[in-house]
Each structure stands twice: as structure tokens, then as C-alpha cells.
Image (cartoon, rainbow, N blue to C red):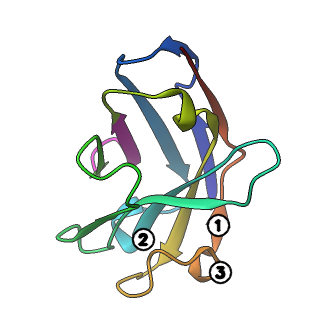
Amino acid sequence: VQLQASGGGLVQTGDSLTISCQMSGRAIGNYAVGWFRQAPGKEREFVAAINFLGGRTFYGDSVKGRFTITRDGAKNAGFLQMNNLKPEDTAVYLCAAYTSGNYYLTQARMYDYWGQGTLVTVSS
């Protein structure tokens, strides 16, 4: 299984951006998909996750109401739509996959595969 995150870039405060996580080697429907982020000098932070059945989503408190996670079986990819971006959202965003994941989706240690990350920079 390989994950390729893409779509990051430089945006302004209040802008929207959607980043993608393309899976290859397996069908994404067998995996929960999670997004984590890491800013310079800070610990990795849980952002959002969707369980492998696709019926439940979870969000970190700092992004709740602004970010939306989805997964598309036809495209074999996961997406993170980010609205009303703030400078504190600046980070490398990492996508991850968790085989048949249905519990503890906020915990990075549960994920089996990780992508390389995509940088999102929000200017003030």
C-alpha cells in the first residue's frame, strides 16, 4: 500500500483548500483514512478521520466545523476539505490508512500506512 498526499500550497487567511490522499496497491474501502498535521517545533496533531465503513467521521477540536473529511472509492482516494483557514493551520498534513479501522481513529499509532505529507501554509 502506498499513499500520496497532494494539493497543499500557500493560501490566505479565510481561504479554502482541499488536499488529497491517493492510495495505490489496495482498495481504500478497506481502510479508515486519517489526516494528521505537524507544524515546526510541535507534536503531530490529529486532524480528522473517517472509519473504514465510511459512516463515521471524527475531527480535532481545532478544526471542527471548518474541515470535512471524505473518501471516494471510485477515485481510491481520501480528501480533506479545509474552509476558513487560519495561520495556525499551517503545517505539513499527513494522510494515513488503518486496516479495517473502526476504533481509536484519533490515535496515530493505530495507522498502518503513511503518506509523505503535503505542506499547507496560511498567510495572515
Amino acid type for the residue under numbered disc 1 = Tyr
Q: Is 53 placed above or below 85 here?
A: below
Q: Residue at x 41, y 52 (%)?
A: 62
Q: What is the magenta range?
A: 73-81
Q: Earlier in the sequence, mark 1 or mark 2?
A: 2
On the image, numbered disc 1 is attached to which residue? Answer: 113
Callout 3: helix, strand or loop? Answer: helix
Q: Which one is in front in this view, the residue at disc 1 or the one at disc 3?
A: 3
Q: Mark 3 and mark 1 in contact (Cβ < 8 Å)? A: no
**CA separation in Å, label 1 and label 3:** 10 Å
On the image, numbered disc 2 is attached to which residue? Answer: 31
Point out which mark residue 109 bears. 3
Q: Mark 2 and mark 1 in contact (Cβ < 8 Å)? A: yes
Q: Who is closer to the viewer here, 92 or 113?
A: 92
Amino acid type for the residue under numbered disc 3 = Arg
Q: Earlier in the sequence, mark 3 or mark 2?
A: 2
Rendering coords of residue 111 (x, y %): 59, 75
Amino acid type for the residue under numbered disc 2 = Tyr
Callout 2: helix, strand or loop? Answer: strand
Q: Is 92 placed above or below 46 here?
A: above
Magenta-colored stretch includes residue 79: yes
Point out which mark residue 104 bears. none
Q: Is 54 placed above or below 48 here?
A: below
- Quadrant of the rendered structure where residue 117 is? top right
